[in-house]
Amino acid sequence: MTADYKIKVQNVTKEFDLFKTRSDQLKAFFSISNQPIPEFWALKGISLEVHPGETLGLIGVNGSGKSTLSNIISGVIPQTTGVVDVRGDTSIVAINSGLRGQLTGLENIRLKALMMGMTNKEIDDMLDDIIAFADIGDFVYQPVKSYSSGMKSRLGFSIAVHINPDILIIDEALSVGDDTFYQKCVEKIQQFKDEGKTIVFVSHSLKQIEKLCDRVAWIQYGDLKQIGKTKEVVGDYRKFIKWFKALNKDDKKKYQNDSKEEQKAFDIKAYEKQVVAERKQAEPDNPNVARDVHKEFYGGVISETMPWRTRIFSTLVAVAVVFLMLVNISGHSLTSTVQDPSLIFHPTRTLTGVVTKTGR
Ligand SMILES: Nc1ncnc2c1ncn2[C@@H]1O[C@H](COP(=O)(O)OP(=O)(O)OP(=O)(O)O)[C@@H](O)[C@H]1O
């Protein structure tokens, strides 16, 4: 890994819990269920860098993990383990991503621009350009949920390129637009490239990838299968697709199922051990390799379940809140109720506020 990067992703994994019901999800969040949760590892340890001014393509079959990776880089979702270091303001363009359905196009523009730290004046100045580029006419006053996928994509792309980010992440946005819009987008991306901006471009269109990308990363069922010059990686990927298409129906299904099973069975502890072993070979004089790797795995990651200390603290807060509510309802003073908690069961007033004669 080099020091000169715009995006660094190191040993990044992403695990999704495959909950069957909402209540299973809640139980797991509060860690009150002993049932093992079926896991699915969408990313099984990805390490790569994107250099300043580079356009990196992400390719791979459906469900290989391209969007998961681009969403992690954009900060839309957290990684399960690993380091994600992004030097600059990213802006993601993905179909259905980043736009709020219940807000109008106009409101979405303002929201996204404000989130990027722009002032209202700056937003007003570029509003017309965004609307003109998106070419969605009066629909800009309608909620985004009423847009076609092409319109959403056009608006998303237009916002993203006009707020002038350092790093642009484009996830399949060009696949739904018509030819005219596609041409406009390609020109805009080319302009970004000429300005030396960094781009991550996710697409199934190998033609688009070949046209726009300097290097390509091929993601295969959660693994980084290959990364390198566009011609080489796209060439090898084409060979794989040809091989896959030549399989009979059962073999195709088996190949896909086996890969998914591997993703379910992925062992994060074994992966960490493997990284430690590799690092020890590279750094034989470092006695703290295991500690360093563990820190890199979990140091920058927010836990998606509640840690014990937080759980105890929130339980105490909840008990205190309920107690105060009951004290309030009972009509006794806090001091006397603390001295004699049974007063809670002998309210001085009813719930309608009428003082009872027998109140203590
Ligand atoms: N929230 C989620 N919960 C469970 N599994 C998920 C979730 N999001 C994604 N996955 C799974 O993770 C894997 C990777 O999905 P992802 O969308 O990143 O793939 P992709 O390469 O972008 O696919 P496509 O080319 O079809 O867009 C898929 O198997 C998908 O089903």
Image: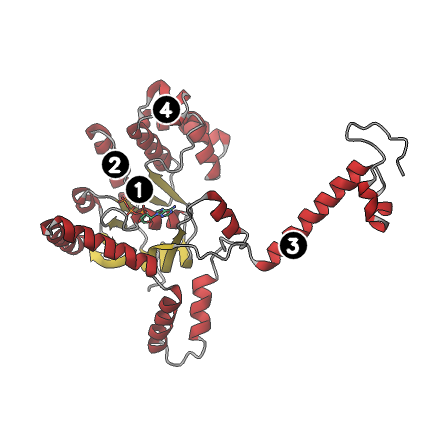
Specify the amino acid type for callout 3.
Phe
Where residue 272 sits in the image (x, y, percent)?
Answer: 39, 68
Q: Is residue 34 visible?
A: yes
Q: Tell me which numbered mark, 2 or 4, is placed earlier along the sequence.
A: 4
At 83% across and 37% down in the image, what residue appears? Answer: 347
SS under mark 1: strand
Front tag of 3 and 4: 3
Left or right of 207, for residue 100: right
The answer to whether the residue bearing label 4 lies less than 8 angstroms from the nearest atom of ligand 1 is no
CB contact under 8 Å: marks 1 and 2: yes
Q: Which residue was labeled with disc 4?
A: 146
Where residue 178 sits in the image (x, y, percent)?
Answer: 22, 29
Mark 3, other Cα within 10 Å: few <14 / some 14–19 / many ≥20: few
Specify the amino acid type for callout 4.
Ser
Question: How many marks on residues?
Answer: 4
- In the drawing, what numbered circle is on residue 313? 3
Specify the amino acid type for callout 1.
Ile
Residue at the bottom extreme? 285
Q: Tell me which numbered mark, 3 or 4, is placed earlier along the sequence.
A: 4
Q: Which residue was labeled with disc 2?
A: 174
Q: Is residue 218 visible?
A: no
- In the drawing, what numbered circle is on residue 170? 1
At 41% across and 59% down in the image, what residue appears? Answer: 83
